[in-house]
């Protein structure tokens, strides 16, 4: 199955850049013989560049030149230019880039309405060309932030476009939500306007909060510097480390945080790319974790954050990995799934972990988790034999859990604070196609979503009355 | 007669591969413990049933491999070839790139019709290679999307294309606490559909086999491979050649037919459970000896008390007082009533075995005479290094509790309407679900009232 990531906006492209870097590292570690295989074809084309950049695709045999299947979109040139001058320059060609110069001014309406309109044809054309090279396109990934103008506005415009042009292909969105202290004043407007689009057009959304990423980075820093660890930490095993870069200090400030998100995407797709005893593809994630169409927000956690240098892993440490996956401080948003209600949960394990390890841990953790009454055994599991680089095993947990509610409620509150005073509204309303109703519809959509989660929460711990079964005349 | 195996989905292909491994390893072994003539006859019969000869001399499995994604089939093909002892026909497989997304409706309504021609073409080719086609053996799990949905569709196609052939579906029940969240929906849809087109469903439950691996095989870190190898052993113990009671001196020439005839007297009752004893780690085999009376005593109690393995059997459970006709509601609790049973004995001194205890009328419903309800197959040829091995294939209330539990969970989820939109988008509506629930409640009711 082939995946097509779209990086939109500054944040999206910075994460995207880390993603391609780590993807190459992962495949290089697994693919020793340099043969272009099915796993590589999920993310990369193999191009014969001997006669220039426009050479034909090679579907089998030795790797010639790997090109990422991607579209990089930004209304400013800075980030994309940096990527094209860096070590990844050969992985992209100009046909995959869509850039402009002036940016979106942190205005969703500029990104969505103005640039959307202006670049629609261009995007569709490049999308079709890229899709033509894909044998079997299964899923689009959109990587963006919610708080700005391009990632948020143009990103959600692209989401709409994808649904129109390729309705059969799944749409997974990785969205970085703004924090309370975000320095973009209008980030609540941008985020809520974008949320409406995510509610209506995304198959699955993986919300991320910078605060959580930041806390994880700090946690790792502390562990390394505390001297408490008996053995040394394997540098390349840090969930925050960049390929090739040995020391965390050399990395740019957001690189460590972006690496976490990049690893999320790698782990999410690992079982589709690599073999295992119980495969888990992306369409299975969507099928099992989305019981009702609008409730498609999944809280994610990655463990372990690092691996110690000793190779033999006692099962106690393996069990610790499972426990950590459910703890508050390993979630990628500020949420505590353990104390809220689970609608569904997926565990994707990589490496030398077998079904008995999975079962033992599910049995162990189940009693302390609250599952909705109609899905008491709601676990989806996957076993992929290939671990991430530097680890012997790892776990990605995805939860459809009402613990997302507080994040949405806070977002709504911040929005209302501005909206009540009509602060900065004119920047949006002066854009062609924007009306007051866009705002009221957007906040209404968010309110409805929050209400759906509240209704489910209300059922938590309530009496369990099983519906009566069909009666058969004897 | 030859059997064509159809491996469906990840589970079906992983298990199928282990089954052919087990069959091949069994006939290669020199632990026949019987006469040379017997061994050769066994060997030949097994080869004819499951393998096709090629010029290279390496036996080729009579199998069609089907999956909607490529990785598992690719592995199965290469692992078999690497073994050097057998292989799959390099053309007898069909796969796609996308998978079925654990969606029964996707497997049944989309992949099924789309790929019917290609798949049935492969099946036809395998069937034509058989001098005499004895029927089809399909291997699938109920929990996912391909094995379950596409598997149900393919079974229907087999029935339509081969109306007089026997079809036995080997169905894997997933772990109770979930491998797939929508597994109960997929299972309900699968079972109700298979009931229309299959002759019988032979069931293995992951939870049960897992316990066997943990408690009897002493495996510490149990993998799916371990589970699949136990399943393969148990299947081998049923399908390797054996002499039927009425048959002449040769091995049974119609294994699937014989199985159906003995075990499925009534179309409403098609669910077969399987037990095999003894089970132990390979390195303990040399140090253990068993007696037939001991083995059969255990096996009989496992039948009566519905025990999953030879440890932890409840010896308190007894059949109702023989002779008196007791209405079903008065039967002692936990007693497992049988419609028909088949015992298969392999190994040393089988001719000395007394199976009278299995013919006790109190074990059975009143419709068949005990001599018709019970059958035995034997062979002095030992199986898979076990000096003595006894299997029980039972059409009884073995699976009733599991089935009831599964339908209950599915119904609970259905009442909340969760996940239904995932099925309706591929054409399976609420009414279709209701029909399937009705079918299964009927089956549950029938088995309960035995």
Image (tube, rainbow, N blue to C red):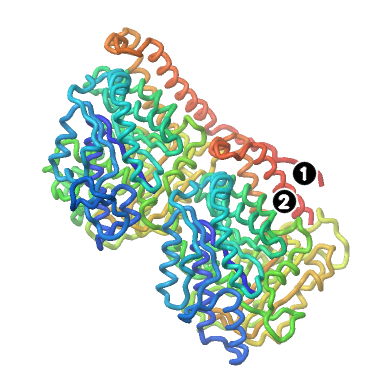
Q: Is residue B109 above or below residue B39?
A: above
Question: Residue farthest to the left?
Answer: A250
Chain ID of residue with mark 1 = A
Chain ID of residue with mark 2 = B
Q: Position of residue B53 (x, y in %)?
A: 53, 78
| Mark 2 crowd level (few <14, some 14–19, many ≥20, 10 Å Cα) | many
Q: Is residue B378 visible?
A: yes
Question: Residue farthest to the right?
Answer: B324
Q: Position of residue A180 (x, y in %)?
A: 28, 23
User: How far apart are the two marked residues, 1 and 2, measured between alpha carbons?
Assistant: 9 Å
Residue at point 61%, 75% (across, down): B49
Question: Residue farthest to the bottom?
Answer: B36
Is A38 left, or right, of A107 in this rendering? right
Residue at point 39%, 50% (across, down): A272
Q: Is residue A406 above or below residue A30?
A: above
Question: Residue farthest to the front?
Answer: A51
Q: Is residue A373 visible?
A: no
Circles 1 and 2: CB atoms closer than 8 Å: yes
How many marks are shown on the rendered structure? 2
Query: What residue does disc 2 label?
Result: B444
Query: What residue does disc 1 label?
Result: A472
Tag 2's secondary structure? helix
Q: Is residue B447 above or below residue B300?
A: above
Is B391 left, or right, of A205 in this rendering? right
Tag 1's secondary structure? loop
- In terms of depth relative to the viewer, which is nearer, A359 or A32? A32
| Mark 1 crowd level (few <14, some 14–19, many ≥20, 10 Å Cα) | few
Residue at point 33%, 60% (across, down): A314
Q: Position of residue A69 (x, y in %)?
A: 29, 43
């Amino acid at each position: 199955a082939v995946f097509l990531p779209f990086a939109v906006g500054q944040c999206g492209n910075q994460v995207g850049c880390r993603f391609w870097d780590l993807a190459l590292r992962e495949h290089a570690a697994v693919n020793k013989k340099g043969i272009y295989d099915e796993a590589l074809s999920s993310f990369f084309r193999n191009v014969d560049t001997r006669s220039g950049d426009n050479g034909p695709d090679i579907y089998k045999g030795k790797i010639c030149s790997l090109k990422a299947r991607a579209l990089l979109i930004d209304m400013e040139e800075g980030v994309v230019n940096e990527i094209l001058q860096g070590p990844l320059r050969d992985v992209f060609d100009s046909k995959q880039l869509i850039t402009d110069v002036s940016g979106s001014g942190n205005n969703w309406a500029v990104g969505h309405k103005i640039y959307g309109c202006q670049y629609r044809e261009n995007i569709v054309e490049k999308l079709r060309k890229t899709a033509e090279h894909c044998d079997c396109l299964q899923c689009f990934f959109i990587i963006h932030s919610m708080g700005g103008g391009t990632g948020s506005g143009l990103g959600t415009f692209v989401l709409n476009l994808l649904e129109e042009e390729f309705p059969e292909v799944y749409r997974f969105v990785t969205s970085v939500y703004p924090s309370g202290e975000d320095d973009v004043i209008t980030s609540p407007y941008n985020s809520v306007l974008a949320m409406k689009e995510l509610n209506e057009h995304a198959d699955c959304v993986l919300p991320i909060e910078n605060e959580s990423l930041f806390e994880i980075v700090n946690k790792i820093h502390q562990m390394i510097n505390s001297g408490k660890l008996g053995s040394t930490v394997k540098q390349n095993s840090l969930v925050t480390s960049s390929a090739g870069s040995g020391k965390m200090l050399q990395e740019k400030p957001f690189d460590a945080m972006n690496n976490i998100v990049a690893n999320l995407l790698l782990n999410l797709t690992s079982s589709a790319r690599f073999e295992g005893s119980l495969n888990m593809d992306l369409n299975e994630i969507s099928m099992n974790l989305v019981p009702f169409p609008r409730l498609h927000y999944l809280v994610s956690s990655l463990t372990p954050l690092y691996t110690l240098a000793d190779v033999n892993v006692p099962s106690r440490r393996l069990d610790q990995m499972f426990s950590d996956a459910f703890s508050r401080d390993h979630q990628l948003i500020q949420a505590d799934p353990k104390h809220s209600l689970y609608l569904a949960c997926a565990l994707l394990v990589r490496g030398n972990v077998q079904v008995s390890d999975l079962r033992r841990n599910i049995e162990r953790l189940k009693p302390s988790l609250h599952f909705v009454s109609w899905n008491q055994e709601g676990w989806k599991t996957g076993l992929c034999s290939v671990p991430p680089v530097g680890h012997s095993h790892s776990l990605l947990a995805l939860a459809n859990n009402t613990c997302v509610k507080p994040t949405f409620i806070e977002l709504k509150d911040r929005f209302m604070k501005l909206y009540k005073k009509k602060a900065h509204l004119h920047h949006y309303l002066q854009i062609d196609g924007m009306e007051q109703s866009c705002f009221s519809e957007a906040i209404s959509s968010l309110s409805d979503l929050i209400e759906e989660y509240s209704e489910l929460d209300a059922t938590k711990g309530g009496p369990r009355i099983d519906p009566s079964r069909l009666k058969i005349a004897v | 007669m030859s059997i064509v195996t159809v491996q469906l989905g990840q589970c079906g292909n992983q298990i199928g591969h282990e089954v052919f491994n087990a069959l091949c390893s069994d006939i290669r072994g020199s632990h026949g413990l019987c006469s040379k003539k017997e061994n050769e006859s066994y060997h030949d019969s097994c080869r004819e049933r499951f393998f096709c000869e090629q010029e290279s001399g390496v036996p080729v499995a009579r199998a069609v491999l089907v999956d909607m994604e490529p990785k598992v089939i690719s592995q199965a093909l290469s692992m078999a070839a690497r073994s050097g002892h057998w292989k799959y026909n390099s053309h007898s497989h069909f796969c796609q790139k996308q998978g079925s997304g654990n969606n029964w409706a996707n497997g049944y309504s989309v992949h099924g019709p789309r790929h019917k021609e290609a798949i049935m073409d492969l099946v036809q080719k395998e069937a034509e290679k058989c001098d005499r086609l004895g029927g089809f053996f399909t291997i699938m799990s109920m929990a996912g999307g391909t094995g379950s949905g596409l598997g149900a569709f393919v079974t229907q196609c087999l029935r339509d294309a081969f109306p007089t052939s026997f079809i036995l579906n080997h169905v894997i029940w997933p772990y109770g606490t979930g491998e797939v969240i929508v597994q109960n929906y997929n299972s309900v849809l699968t079972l109700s559909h298979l009931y229309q087109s299959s002759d019988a469903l032979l069931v293995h439950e992951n939870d049960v086999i897992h316990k066997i691996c943990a408690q009897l095989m002493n495996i510490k870190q149990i993998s799916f491979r371990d589970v699949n190898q136990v399943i393969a052993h148990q299947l081998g113990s049923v399908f390797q050649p054996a002499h039927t009671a009425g048959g002449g001196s040769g091995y049974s020439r119609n294994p699937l037919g014989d199985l159906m005839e003995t075990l499925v007297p009534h179309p409403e009752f098609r669910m077969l459970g399987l037990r095999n004893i003894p089970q132990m780690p390979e390195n303990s085999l040399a140090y253990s000896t068993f007696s037939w009376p001991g083995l059969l005593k255990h096996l009989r109690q496992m039948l009566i008390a519905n025990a999953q393995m030879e440890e932890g059997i409840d010896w308190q459970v007894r059949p109702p007082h023989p002779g008196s006709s007791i209405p079903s509601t008065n039967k002692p609790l936990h007693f497992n009533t049988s419609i028909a049973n088949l015992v298969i004995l392999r190994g040393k001194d089988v001719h000395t075995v007394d199976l009278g205890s299995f013919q006790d009328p109190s074990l059975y419903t009143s419709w068949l005479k005990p001599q018709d309800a019970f059958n035995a197959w034997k062979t002095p040829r030992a199986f898979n290094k076990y000096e003595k091995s006894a299997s029980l294939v039972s059409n009884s209330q073995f699976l009733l509790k599991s089935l009831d539990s599964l339908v209950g969970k599915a119904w609970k989820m259905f009442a909340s309407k969760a996940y239904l939109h995932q099925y309706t988008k591929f054409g399976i509506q609420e009414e279709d679900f209701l029909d399937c629930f009705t079918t299964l409640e009927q089956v549950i009711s029938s088995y309960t009232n035995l």
